[in-house]
Amino acid sequence: MDEKEKFVKPYGDTQDDGIIQMSFTIPLSLPLSREVAKRVVREMGLVDENIVYEKDIYGFTFFIVYGKFNKYIDTSKIKMKVEEIKKLDYFEIEKIMEEKLDRKIKIIACTLGTDAHTVGLDAIINAKGYNGDNGLERYKGFEILNLGSQVPHEFLIQKIKEFKPNVVLISQTVTQKNIHLKNLTLLSELLEAENLRDKILLICGGYKITPELAHELGYDMGFGANTYPSQVAYYIVNEVIKRNLLNKWS
Ligand code: B12
């Protein structure tokens, strides 16, 4: 590892300038909100705060601010436990399914509890997919029941019992007051209590989800921002084969 990779700070305009761009809202009007905004940035440990945009919106002010981060991060001290998801394309994954599976993989998907954000889940599920990468519905080897948004936990459990899926896909976008943690944990607990957990591959996704968080909450895997459907498809196919999941419902 060379020095440039070992000690790193944010890049704004030139190497090592440490410039960070951020946006936030202060629940006050100008000009007091401006002074609060500057102090917020300084309290974050940033210096040379520079407000490049401010908009007063009826008692609230939206800011875009630059600040300078003056320290370096020593990357040699970072221990990562990131699961590498190999990338195969649609045709390669279809071929594995054709060769190794005698039935379709059954999948239930939804956004759980109060969460109404469907765009991320649809990007993974809908045939049209995401950024040119086919969605799971396009794969011949998947049979998908998409329950849509704001699905109550109890309703999902009932649907799992009826549909007998091999995989359950949960999307969580809202993280205010850690609602995603509560929603996700409750589901994994209910699945355990109902003796359903071992029959399924349990996956969650959303822009704040990481594999580490997913494991902590009792999930097999978690996918974050910029996930492509083929990454999810490949993970599913591999795990279903490895865990012999097609034979778990009798
Ligand atoms: C569109 C949107 C809405 C729409 C949703 C419409 C819809 N049908 O989905 C509407 C207007 C309804 C909405 C409402 C709200 N929203 Co909103 N919304 C957004 C917005 C602008 C875009 C989200 C999005 O579509 N991203 C695009 C997709 C493609 O990205 P993604 O979700 O990350 O998905 C990818 C990955 O995460 C992953 N993934 C996601 N899910 C899954 C699932 C699985 C199984 C897998 C494998 C992968 C996976 O794969 C996807 C593709 O790569 C974001 C801000 C932003 N720019 O991100 C705010 C945002 C998410 N919303 C936010 C908030 C606060 C709300 C509201 C609470 C606002 C309010 N006070 O009413 C409500 C909540 C409603 C509710 N009950 O859930 C906040 C959340 C902040 C937080 N910490 O929780 C955000 C970040 C805005 C902000 N900066 O404040 N919202």
Image (cartoon, rainbow, N blue to C red):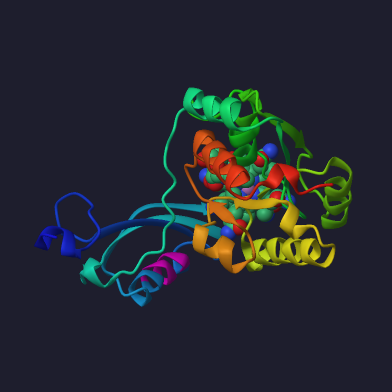
Residue 58 seen: no
At a point 50% along the width and 26% down the height, the residue shown is 90
Q: Position of residue 74 (x, y in %)?
A: 22, 70
Q: Is residue 3 left or right of residue 143?
A: left
Residue 220 figure quarter: bottom right
Is 233 placed left or right of 30 in the picture? right
Q: Is residue 224 above or below residue 118?
A: below
250 or 173: which is nearer to us? 250
Residue in view at x 77 percent, y 65 percent: 192
Residue 156 magenta-drawn?
no
Q: Is residue 195 above or below residue 234?
A: below
Residue 160: x percent and y percent? 83, 48
**Which of the pair 197/211 is nearer the observer?**
197
Which residues fall within the magenta stretch?
Answer: 33-38
Residue 155 visible somewhere in the drawing: yes
Q: Is residue 34 magenta?
A: yes
* Rendering coords of residue 13 (x, y %): 19, 49
Residue 155 x %, y %: 87, 51
